[in-house]
Image (spheres, helix red, strand yellow):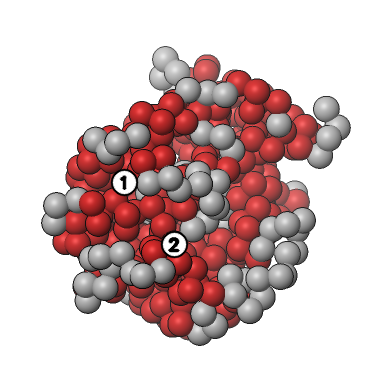
Amino acid sequence: MAREKWGTKLGFMLAAMGSAVGLGNIWRFSFVAGNNGGGAFLLLYLVFVLLIGIPLLLTEVSIGRKAESDVVGSFKKLAPKTPWYLTGFFGITSAFLILSFYAVVAGWAIFYFWNYVNGSFFTEPEVGYGGAFGQFIGHTWHPIIWTAVFMILTIVIVLSGVKKGIELANKIFMPLLALILIGLAFFSLSLDGASEGLKFLFAPNWSALSDPSIYIAALGQAFFSLSLGMGAMLTYGSYLKKEDKLPSAAVGIGLMDTFFAVISGLVIFPAVFAFGIDPSSGPPLVFITLPSIFEQMPLGGIVGLVFFFALVLASLSSSVSILEVPTAYFMSAFGWSRFSTSVVMGSIMFVMGIAVSLGFGAWAGVTPIGEKNILDSMDYIASNILLPLGGLSMALLVGWYFKKSTALEATDMTGSPFAGIWYNIVKYVAPVVIFLIFLNKIGVI
Ligand code: PHE
Ligand code: NA
């Protein structure tokens, strides 16, 4: 069977932006920034996105487009008889780890949407929004139902094929989400005490830079948010036609994703300080903060409803790109149908998601890595370690294994005034920076 192609370059752009923009910008960005002291983290994150993220995004998409294959097959084709294809198995592992917690958190978002539909979050519950959230995620099976709903939606989109499923949701709901977030940011900035939040987000506390964890956290956030290093962008790139130009697409996707993260910060942190919430509350942070904002707003109930609807759709356009990674691989490696592959992969991820969900209740004492619960442990391994390693491997392929002329041609950079900068980043800067951050983290330097 012939591989599918995007209808238009716009179709690819929307799908890739849909992959990038998701819970990573709102939920993950806020709590990782909150845990790592705010301003210094934001600065490092922005540096990593510009210096490493966008150049590697171009690199990853170009690998897929050149090979026209999945995350394992692409490396086998472009670097035959080398171990490079192992990158693909790292990517598939990341996909399983990430989607199993992503579906749990997106399930929480669907539950919130439902609470705005039936009005129960229009006014603060007696136990407070934080209390209600804690009770909900601590419940044994209640949140799992919502995880299942989200996973089923993801599977249905992936099994109907990359083109049909994804384009529409992205065309309408990304702009809607952006509009709501901008409106929310203005409202949040008008709250009493908002300036504390601005200071937290934009005034770097330089001493935070002496902690090695902040570098790996910022690097991991840049990779996670840009959907980088797993093969999601590679797989989407493999559905591109040769004549579509890549550099402008990579820059557009990168800037759009970063815009969503910064706006989310402007929504969340002023409110965090205005409502006296602890910025280092971890994964629950936005789920406690947002309803408090909506309650204070005129027509906040309606705004909350639309917001969570848009957030769920943004999450779906990301989750389908994650499920697509193992689906594309198993389909082509074993000749399975799209239908059964996506159902089987999605079901395995759902079962892993049950463990993630229980990690907030019955299994709260299970801490696979240090103090980290199941979600945080899986997130740490996938986002902070496997994704940067995947990106490192892609950079080495294009920077060192390819001839320079091949690398430039694959990325449509031949003759570009930025060709030299891009090439040196991919060949030297990105590998060295990623390597140093790992050494620093494990205490070698
Ligand atoms: N970038 C997505 C987000 O920010 C998550 C994602 C990670 C998607 C890795 C694909 C691959 O929500
Ligand atoms: Na993102």
Image position, residue 269 (x, y; %): 40, 40
x 57%, y 43%: residue: 35
x 51%, y 34%: residue: 38
Up/down of 102 relative to 224, above or below: below
x 45%, y 48%: residue: 277
Whether residue 362 is visible to the viewer of this picture, yes or no, is yes
x 54%, y 83%: residue: 140
User: Which of these two is toward me, 203 or 436?
Assistant: 203
Image position, residue 353 (x, y; %): 56, 74
Separation of residues labelled 2 and 1 (CA atoms) = 37 Å
Residue sitting farthest toward the front: 126
Image position, residue 107 (x, y; %): 42, 71
> On the image, numbered disc 2 is attached to which residue?
130
Left/right of residue 46 with respect to residue 396 in the rendered view: left
Secondary structure at numbered mark 1: helix
Judged by depth in the image, the label closer to the viewer, 2 or 1, is 2
Up/down of 142 relative to 184, above or below: below
Give the numbered dot on residue 77.
Answer: none
Q: Which amino acid lies under the numbered mark 2 shown in the image of this protein? A: Gly
Up/down of 29 relative to 15, above or below: above
Residue sitting farthest toward the left: 299
Residue sitting farthest toward the right: 444
> On the image, numbered disc 1 is attached to which residue?
13
Q: Which amino acid lies under the numbered mark 1 shown in the image of this protein? A: Met
Q: Quadrant of the N terminus?
A: bottom left
